[in-house]
């Protein structure tokens, strides 16, 4: 009897211990921070990141890690879906619907595995649809003072405490807001500094900051860089607050930490591009009991598309399959993965909706970039165009031929670029036309084509015909005809304005309204009506009208081209086998969810 009780108690203790042996996961990201802005990654400015350097001393640090995309929302969705943008549907800054998402993402996988999930900042940019069912969202993104370092310690403590109360290990994603613009002290006109209550622990001066090799050295540019580096220091202060909160919680030794930036600094030739400094990220992983403190991996190329499968391996969660990325957990354990010799990168849309697709492949020594949109006339817009640095470069270009050439490349690019980044990390000398580099370029082009085939990249055909300028232009013209411009989005939002003739005030965003029947009959036709009211400057747009089943599956879709005010009548055949079930109707202005100006879906309609 005593032995049986002892075995029962022992079994309970073992099971209880194994439950709590699950490690916590703390993901820390910075926003718009170049890798070489961090001390241990060779920052030429002393004392920029003492807390990040301290974390590096506890972690395995990767020297050749790259994100896939150079702008925020698509970059973060690659990380947490394990899929390239052309496969996860997040090519720009437009979310997809919950129903359209056909793949698992980090938050739901770890939640189903028993972890308590929480996030702060970049909430809508970190998942393919919003709102996403995190267990806790740490603060209101629209009202939070996310530039306040102390608030990040509070957020970490709140998330850890909430997980403890739920009796679960935590998975927290803390997306620090710095050094994203506005920088520390930035807010005045034309680059003037303004008082900023969130002062970093050290403020850097224009005279002491380093100027990246891809930018000219100029007082106005140095001033903006000093604000950037001060914001990097404030990001580091936030990291320090998070790590202190973790240590105070008593969970430090049972917490995996993953630290990285989403892409490079928000200045020309970094953010929104695919250059070396656009994508290189300071990836550090601290896996207690596995990674060796203070070690550096200088051998393997690591891509952000590999993060999710790697995290699942660390947490011992079964891989659901379907990822484009592959786990590098073996590297974290000290093993070799000799196949990791290159990474692939892509860009599609900027935040304004402009589609300028680019693809790149990079090894430790070489970088190849393909930009089919480049025709010598089309200008690429983006987040860095309005910076003080870009404005000053345009001023300097008037009297400086070299800077004028850089501005011309920045605006127009060229269809193909190749750089020997081992010696030219700033990508200043395009070697694509050099005969002596032909074999190297051919190898990279072949690797690019194989990757496109393997991942189902829709850019494959235009890449194969990259020497045909007319075909490239035809392809891009088709993309441009389908994209939704910032002007169109603005026009949709302006529906709250009083109409000139009728004096009526429309409901915000109500380009369409659904006239849903109370019920439908199985085996019979139904005429579903959609009212549309487009402002004159919106022009003609496609409207998709869809009949859906009880599980939200598409039964039939019809497309109409409409403008102005009127009523669409879509006739659908209700399947005979739906009696006793429900259907729903949806209307969408655009060609798909990702470019929709408006998307409405009715409540379930009974089928008699």
Image (cartoon, grey):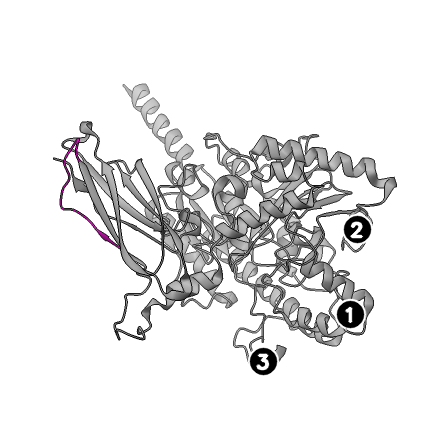
Comparing labels 2 and 3, the label whose residue is closer to the camera: 2
Q: Report the residue at 43% width, 54% height from top.
A: 124
Real-space Cα separation, disc 2 to disc 1, in angstroms: 21 Å
Q: Nearer the viewer, residue 284 or 309?
A: 309
Check if mark 1's residue and mark 3's residue have beta carbons within 8 Å. no
Assign a secondary structure to mark 2.
Answer: loop
The mark that comes first in sequence, 2 or 1, is 1
Whether residue 63 can be seen here: no
Assign a secondary structure to mark 3.
Answer: helix
Q: Would residue 316 be found to the left or right of residue 567 on screen? A: right
Assign a secondary structure to mark 1.
Answer: loop
- The mark found on residue 492 in the picture is none
Q: Residue furthest left?
A: 608
Asked if the stretch drawn in magenta spans residue 521, the answer is yes
Query: What residue does disc 3 label?
Result: 189
Q: Report the residue at 32% width, 75% height from top.
A: 500
Query: What residue does disc 2 label?
Result: 430
Q: Would residue 46 be found to the left or right of residue 82 on screen? A: right
Q: Nearer the viewer, residue 523 or 368?
A: 523
Q: Main secondary structure of the magenta part?
A: loop
Query: What residue does disc 1 label?
Result: 217
Asked if the stretch drawn in magenta spans residue 555, the answer is no
Residue 443 location, quadrant: top right
Residue 432: x and y, percent? 79, 45
The mark that comes first in sequence, 1 or 3, is 3
Q: Nearer the viewer, residue 278 or 235?
A: 278
């Amino acid at each position: 009897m005593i032995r049986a009780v002892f075995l029962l108690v022992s079994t309970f203790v073992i099971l209880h211990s194994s439950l709590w042996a699950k490690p916590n996961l703390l993901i820390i990201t910075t926003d718009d921070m170049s890798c070489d802005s961090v001390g241990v990654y060779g920052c030429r400015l002393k004392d920029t990141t003492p807390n990040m350097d301290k974390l590096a001393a506890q972690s395995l640090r990767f020297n050749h890690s790259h994100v896939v995309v150079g702008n925020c929302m698509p970059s973060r969705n690659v990380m947490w879906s394990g899929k390239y943008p052309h496969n996860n549907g997040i090519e720009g800054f437009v979310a997809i619907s919950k129903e359209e998402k056909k793949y698992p993402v980090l938050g739901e996988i770890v939640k189903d595995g028993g972890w308590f999930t929480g996030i702060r900042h970049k909430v809508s940019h970190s998942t393919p649809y919003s709102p996403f069912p995190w267990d806790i969202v740490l603060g209101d993104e629209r009202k939070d003072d996310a530039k306040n370092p102390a608030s990040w310690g509070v957020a970490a403590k709140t998330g850890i405490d909430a997980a403890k109360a739920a009796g679960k290990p935590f998975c927290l994603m803390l997306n620090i807001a710095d050094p994203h613009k506005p920088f520390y002290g930035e807010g005045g006109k034309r680059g003037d500094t303004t008082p900023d209550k969130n002062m970093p622990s050290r403020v850097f001066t224009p005279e002491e900051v380093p100027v990246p090799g891809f930018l000219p050295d100029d007082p106005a540019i140095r001033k903006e860089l000093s604000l950037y580096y001060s914001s990097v220091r404030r990001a580091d202060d936030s990291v320090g607050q998070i790590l202190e909160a973790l240590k105070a919680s008593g969970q430090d030794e049972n917490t995996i930490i993953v630290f990285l930036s989403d892409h490079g600094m928000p200045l020309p030739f970094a953010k929104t591009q695919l250059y070396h400094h656009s994508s290189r990220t300071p990836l550090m992983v601290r896996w207690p009991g596995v990674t060796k403190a203070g070690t550096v991996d200088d051998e393997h190329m690591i891509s952000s598309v590999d993060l999710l499968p790697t995290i699942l391996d660390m947490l011992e969660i079964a891989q659901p399959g379907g990822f484009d990325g592959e786990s590098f957990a073996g590297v974290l354990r000290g093993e070799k993965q000799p196949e990791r010799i290159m990474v692939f990168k892509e860009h599609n849309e900027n935040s304004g909706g402009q589609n300028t697709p680019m693809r790149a492949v990079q090894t430790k020594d070489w970088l190849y970039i393909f930009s089919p949109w480049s025709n010598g006339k089309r200008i690429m817009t983006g987040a860095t165009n309005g910076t003080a640095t870009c404005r000053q470069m345009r001023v300097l270009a008037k009297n400086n031929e070299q800077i004028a050439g850089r501005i011309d490349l920045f605006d127009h690019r060229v269809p193909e670029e190749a750089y020997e980044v081992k010696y030219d990390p700033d990508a200043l000398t395009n070697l694509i036309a050099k005969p002596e580099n032909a074999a190297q370029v051919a190898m990279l082009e072949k690797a690019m084509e194989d990757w496109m085939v393997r991942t189902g990249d829709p850019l494959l055909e235009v890449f194969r015909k990259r020497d045909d300028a007319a075909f490239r232009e035809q392809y891009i013209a088709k993309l441009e005809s389908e994209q939704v411009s910032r002007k169109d989005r603005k026009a949709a939002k302006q529906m709250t304005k009083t109409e000139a003739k009728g004096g009526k005030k429309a409901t915000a965003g109500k380009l369409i309204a659904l006239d849903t029947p109370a019920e439908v009959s199985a085996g019979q036709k139904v005429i579903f009506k959609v009212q549309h009211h487009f402002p004159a400057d919106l022009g003609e747009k496609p409207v998709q009208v869809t009949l859906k089943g009880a599980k939200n599956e598409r039964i039939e879709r019809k497309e109409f081209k409409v403008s102005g005010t009127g009523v669409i009548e879509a006739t659908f055949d209700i399947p005979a086998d739906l009696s006793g079930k429900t259907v729903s109707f949806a209307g969408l202005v655009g060609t798909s969810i990702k470019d929709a100006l408006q998307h409405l879906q009715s409540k379930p309609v009974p089928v008699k």
